[in-house]
């Protein structure tokens, strides 16, 4: 069992890259965790403790090596009302319940539902997150002195140009170099710019195990349950979507059901160590991958270095200019955005473009990742159903010798093509025999069976002898179970008889 979580190649196959990327991610996590704590209405240490514990635990139990999980903005937005009305202790309890629900989802293999998310929705999700990451940096670039713009521009220059420096350009991750250089420049030039220390007080003690101080009764459970359900859904959605994106970036596969369980264990631990609920972070995950991180060691060290920095090196961390971290996050937003999707707007089907753009618009304007993905999947499903319905048609031929009309139904028959099936028959023609050949058709639902019933009953009322032939096993099963055309008593009930 232990070997499952300690595979050598996942932990020690990329020690140098994972170590350096872990440092970069830890630095990037600090202002984010503080900012998300402020959004949720709690002390900065709540977000920092959560980021530490979630990163450490998902390194062991998560299903996607190299993916970074911590406190996130999407989750923080869902906590605001709970914290405002009931306080921090109820948030910690909701975090624990969130983890339990996520573990249950993992055991029920709900991670497999990602197969129902179309590529267009994933691209829209990625592009929306890239826009949100960039928008989140704008407050740091508004109503500031020119020094901030200069430092940010210099940081971006280092990020994109340092890799071209001979020898050392490939040895050190450029985001880490950017943070160090911009910090030194700001200190030696005595620039009065906003720093990490200005974001809020950093914790000065290690997290400890604690049980939320709340009444353990049904009333408490009903208070936190709605929030926990929302947190569990959004957390899993963002984590599984991020895992899919990292899969693409690294050309590897991940275990989505294990990821559900890992996120659950991490949130349970976060709630019992004074942290808020969290999930996978696409921005930090991209930073990790771009900085050379690939294995579980990078995720573990990101959490470990985060704790060491904020608890033992807070004096050093607090002087890092926000401009340096803004430059790193802008790099992330640029690297996250799928620029090819803009070019593909001219070549892809209109339906695909509508799904992608709708996902982007909904996520950006509502900041609700779950709602954006739901809208995208719903639109994609409707477009798919409409497209499949057009592939159904009905051919007919007439045998004068036997006075027989044969209809050959081809395609998928379901709720969206049921009316088309009914309309494809000629009920005005008077023939002795009608054969309906279903060899090349598949009936999917009750709507399809109901349409077939109407056809057979109407043809028989017109005096024809109707036979059905060629049903495949699945179609025959649903027709026999729900069809009424061969059940006189059911026909009487439908016609109002007694």
Image: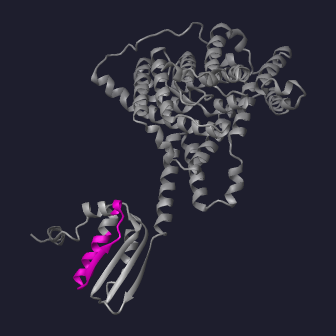
As rendered, which of 195 and 256 lies closer to the eye?
A: 256
Q: Give the residue displayed 50% in from the left and 18% down from the top.
A: 2
Q: Give the residue displayed 53% in from the left and 37% down from the top.
A: 240
- Quarter holding residue 33: top right
Q: Is residue 484 visible?
A: yes
Q: Is residue 143 visible?
A: no
Q: Is residue 397 magenta?
A: no
As rendered, which of 390 and 316 lies closer to the eye?
A: 390
- Left/right placement of residue 169 relative to residue 31 reads right
- Quarter holding residue 432: bottom left
Q: Give the residue displayed 48% in from the left and 14% down from the top.
A: 273
Q: Give the residue displayed 34% in from the left and 76% down from the top.
A: 436
- The residue most toward the front is 401
* Residue 167 sits above or below residue 452 on the image: above
Q: Position of residue 260 (x, y in %)?
A: 48, 31
Q: How many marks?
A: 0
Q: Position of residue 3 (x, y in %)?
A: 53, 20
Residue range corresponding to the magenta coloring: 451-475
- The residue most toward the right is 166
- The residue most toward the bottom is 401
């Amino acid at each position: 069992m232990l070997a499952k979580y300690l595979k050598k190649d996942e932990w020690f196959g990329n020690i140098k890259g994972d170590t350096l990327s872990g440092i970069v991610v830890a630095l990037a996590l600090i202002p984010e965790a503080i900012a998300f704590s402020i959004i949720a209405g709690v002390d900065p240490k709540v977000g920092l403790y959560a980021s530490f514990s979630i990163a450490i635990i998902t390194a062991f139990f998560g299903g996607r090596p190299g993916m970074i999980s911590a406190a996130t903005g999407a989750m923080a937005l869902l906590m605001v009302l709970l914290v405002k009305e009931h306080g921090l202790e109820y948030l910690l309890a909701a975090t624990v319940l969130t983890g339990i629900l996520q573990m249950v989802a993992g055991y029920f293999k709900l991670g497999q539902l990602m197969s129902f998310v179309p590529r267009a929705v994933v691209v829209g999700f990625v592009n929306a997150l890239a826009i949100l990451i960039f928008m989140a940096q704008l407050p740091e670039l508004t109503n500031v002195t020119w020094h901030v713009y200069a430092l940010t521009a210099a940081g971006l220059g280092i990020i994109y140009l340092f890799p071209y420096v001979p020898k050392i350009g490939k040895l050190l991750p450029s985001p880490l170099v950017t943070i160090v250089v911009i910090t030194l420049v700001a200190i030696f030039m005595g620039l009065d710019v906003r720093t990490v220390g200005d974001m809020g007080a950093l914790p000065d003690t290690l997290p400890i195990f604690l049980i939320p101080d709340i009444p353990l009764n049904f009333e408490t459970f009903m208070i936190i349950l709605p929030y926990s359900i929302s947190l569990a859904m959004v957390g899993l959605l963002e984590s599984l979507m991020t895992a899919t994106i990292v899969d693409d970036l690294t050309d590897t596969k991940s275990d989505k059901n294990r990821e559900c369980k890992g996120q659950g264990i991490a949130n349970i631990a976060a709630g019992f160590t004074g942290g808020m609920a969290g999930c996978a972070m696409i921005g930090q995950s991209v930073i990790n991958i771009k900085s050379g991180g690939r294995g579980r060691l990078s995720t573990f060290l990101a959490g470990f270095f985060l704790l060491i920095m904020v608890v033992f090196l807070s004096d050093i961390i607090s002087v890092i200019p926000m401009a340096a971290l803004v430059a790193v996050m802008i790099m992330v937003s640029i690297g996250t955005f799928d620029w090819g999707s803009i070019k593909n707007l001219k070549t892809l089907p209109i339906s695909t473009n509508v799904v992608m753009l709708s996902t982007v618009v909904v996520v950006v304007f509502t900041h609700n990742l779950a709602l954006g993905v739901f809208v995208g999947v719903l639109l994609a499903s409707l477009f798919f159903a409409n497209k499949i319905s057009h592939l159904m048609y009905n051919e007919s031929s007439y045998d004068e010798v036997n006075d027989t009309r044969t209809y050959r139904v081809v395609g998928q028959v379901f709720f969206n093509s049921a009316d088309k099936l009914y309309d494809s028959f000629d009920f005005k023609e008077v023939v002795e025999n009608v054969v309906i050949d279903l060899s090349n058709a598949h009936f999917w639902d009750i709507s399809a069976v109901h349409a077939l019933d109407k056809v057979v009953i109407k043809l028989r009322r017109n005096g024809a002898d109707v036979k059905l032939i060629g049903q495949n096993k699945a179609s025959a099963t649903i027709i026999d179970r729900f069809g009424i055309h061969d059940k006189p008593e059911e026909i009487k009930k439908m016609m109002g008889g007694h």
